[in-house]
Amino acid sequence: MAQEDSSIRTLTVDIGGSGIKVLVLDEAGKALTERSRVETPQPPKPDAVIDAIAQLASGQGEFHRVSVGFPGVVRGGVTQTAVNLDPDWVGFDLATMLSERLDKSVRVANDADVQGLGAISGKGVELVITLGTGFGSALFLDGKLVPNLEMGHHEFRKGETYEQQLGRAALDKAGEKKWNNRLEKAIASLEHLFNYDCLYIGGGEAKKVILQLPANVKVVPNVSGLLGGIALWHD
C-alpha cells in the first residue's frame, strides 16, 4: 500500500562550525521531535561529522529521508567549499556518504539557503544572512533561490570580508557593541547593493543583535536552519 504523504518524516540536519543540530519534521514542515545538538567534532573532518549526525539521528525516532544544511557551496550533494570546517570537505560527496550511512535518501544544500527557505515569505527580493562561526548568505527572488551567493568572502570594509568583520572570531575580539556597529554598516551596504524588500538575520549569533533594526529587517530564530529543510523536498 502506498505511503500517505502526510506520514513522511524528514530528518533535518544543520551542520555548523561549532555545533550540529537535528530535528524531525512532518510533511508540512512542523517539528515532530525536540531539537538535539552536539558540538562539532574537532578536527571537523567528514567521517567524524557523519558519525555525529548518525549518533544524533539514532535518538530522533523514525524518519524516511534527510535534509542537510552545510556551511559552504554545495553542488549535486557534493561539498565544494568548507572554510570553517576542514579541507577534506572540498569535493566530498556528502549526500551519497550520509545516504549510505543512514540508509535513507539525502539532499544537501548550503546552510544559509536552508535557513532562508525556513524564513522567507516568497514575495519580492529577500536576502538572508546568517551570523555564526562564519557569515552565510542567500538571495531569493519571489521565493526562487539565486544559487551559490557566498557573499561572506567578499570584501566589506577596511580590506576585510563580511566574515572577517562579522564572524564569531570578530565578535569575540571586538565585543558586542563594536560588532553591532559593524552590522549596522553591513545592513546599510547590503540594502544599497541588493535593494531588497526584506532582510532576514539568522544564525547562532543573531541573538547578540542589539541595534535598532529598520522595518524591513527581521531577526529569525536559529531553528529556521532546520525548519527550512522540508523545502529541499518540494519538487
Image (cartoon, helix red, strand yellow):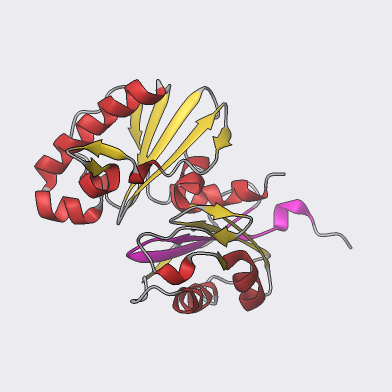
214 relative to 131, above or below: above
Q: Name the residue rendered at 55%, 29% in the picture.
A: 122
Q: Is residue 19 magenta?
A: yes
Q: Name the residue rendered at 38%, 35% in the picture.
A: 200
Percent position of residue 16, x then y: 39, 61
Q: From where the camera sits, is residue 29 visible?
A: yes
Q: Is residue 121 magenta?
A: no
**On-image quarter of the N terminus:** bottom right
Snapshot quadrant of residue 20: bottom left
Nearer the observer, 73 or 130: 73
Percent position of residue 111, x then y: 46, 52
Q: From where the camera sits, is residue 216 visible?
A: no
Q: Residue furthest right?
A: 1
Picture mark count: 0
Percent position of residue 66, x then y: 61, 62
**On-image quarter of the C terminus:** top right
Left/right placement of residue 51 relative to residue 95 reads left
Percent position of residue 30, x then y: 56, 50
Left/right placement of residue 27 relative to residue 138 reads right
Question: What are the residue bounds of the magenta stretch?
Answer: 4-26
Nearer the observer, 177 or 154: 154
Q: Name the residue rendered at 46%, 76% in the picture.
A: 52
Snapshot quadrant of residue 36: bottom left
